[in-house]
Amino acid sequence: MKIETLAIHAGNESDKSTGAVVQPITLSTTFLRGPQGDYPGGYMYSRAENPNRQALESVLTKLENGVDACAFASGNAAGMSVFQALEPGSHIICPDDMYHGLRNQLKLMFKGILTFDFIDFTDVELIFNTIKRETKLIWAETPSNPLMKLCDIGAIAHIAKEHQITFVIDNTFASPICQKPLDLGADMVMHSTTKFLNGHSDVSGGALITKEDTDLWKKIRIVQSYGGAIPSPFDCYLVTRGIKTLPYRMRGHVENATMLANYLENHPAVEAVFYPGLKSHPQHELAQKQMLSFGGMLSFLLKDGEEKAHSVVNSLKIFTQATSLGGVESLIEHRYSVEGPDTKTPKNLLRVSVGLEHIDDLIADLDAVL
Ligand SMILES: *Cc1c(COP(=O)(O)O)cnc(C)c1O
């Protein structure tokens, strides 16, 4: 089946007892036992499993062409479960522009337990040269946040496979509609479902999807059920509901982002625009090779520096000044002031999550303040 069909059907089981077409929300934390002490409904206790979580995991598996998925209470909890599943002393290679929340998680929570190198992921040879005997994980993010840098998923997957290193892609920025890392050779995909997958800026959630049921994956399941950073049944229901329109929402995000990128690129107040779909993007060719479409995220630099960046975000009327991304409403943000002093983000950069408003209104809003 095609992705539009899977998005609607793979996460929904109509209720046999009432005939409800949309799967109901199962709030019960505990489930009836049978005469032999068994669990005739297939469920025991909701930390371990829940019908709404199972529905969400089922549709996520299909969207990324995997064999299984684990849903979590946030994107960071999903990422953390991978780090927690590694043996102590393992070495991780990650991008120097890794999502700051996960970078800080590694630095603040896993220091002394795991070792890590943060390097430039556009340089495949550097990744190769950073591999040690203890390297167990290569963690990548493409396009990256907020500079929209790409890494070559196929080339890194090749190196990872040769060294029996697990290769995980944080696919949050692209979404499964715009990029399929498992098809390109990655072993696992991570999502902050808070973003495009839910798509309405009203749920925190995260997920991992795997290409194979490995020993590491079994350990991640243990982290999920015993660590307990699980999403609530209502959160699972909302994300599953959001996913039903994901393929159509992404078309709108991509269309608007493409037009906005072109507009910004031709504006005299703008120094540079970073969007993988632009010919001027330094890795446009790689984007065409590995992405199905170019996503709804872009960033740009203002010629007049940080002050102008602040005045722009403060004067816009339709774009909302806030962090996060992937919702129906357009968001704009000065990233440098969010990410902290060890960031590589330029001070005159604004990041835009291009929403689904009419493009004419978005451009008029920017035009009035630029
Ligand atoms: C938001 C985000 C995360 C973290 O997800 P939460 O749901 O906020 O925990 C991880 N990676 C990327 C690329 C993100 O944008």
Image: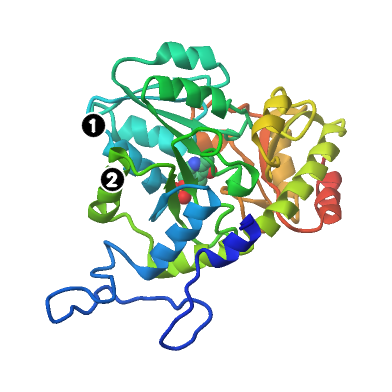
In x, y percent, where is residue 43?
27, 70
In x, y percent, where is residue 41?
28, 76
Image side of residue 265 versus residue 354, left or right = right
Q: Residue furthest front?
A: 1
> Colour mode?
rainbow
Image side of residue 165 versus residue 222, left or right = right
Q: CA distance from mark 2 to mark 1?
A: 13 Å
Asked whether the beta carbons under mark 2 and mark 1 sit within 8 Å of each other, the answer is no
Residue 218 tag number: 2
Residue 231 seen from this side: yes
Identified at 83% across, 37% down, the residue is 262
- Give the mark nearer the N terminus: 2 vs 1: 1
Q: In the rendered view, would you say 282 is above or below 216?
A: above
Identified at 52% across, 48% down, the residue is 65
Q: Nearer the viewer, residue 319 or 232?
A: 232
Residue 194 seen from this side: no
Amino acid bearing label 1: Glu
Q: Which residue is mark 1?
A: 87
Q: Residue furthest bottom?
A: 18
Q: Nearer the viewer, residue 174 or 261?
A: 174
Q: Quadrant of residue 149?
A: top right
Residue 202 tag number: none
Q: Residue furthest left?
A: 36
Number of callouts: 2
The kind of secondary structure element at disc 1 is: loop
Disc 2 within 8 angstroms of ligand 1 (CB): no
Identified at 66% across, 37% down, the residue is 291
Q: In the rendered view, would you say 100 is above or below 366?
A: above
Quadrant of the rendering where the C terminus is positioned = top right
In x, y percent, where is residue 127?
47, 17
Q: In the rendered view, would you say 77 is above or below 97?
A: below
Identified at 28% across, 71% down, the residue is 42
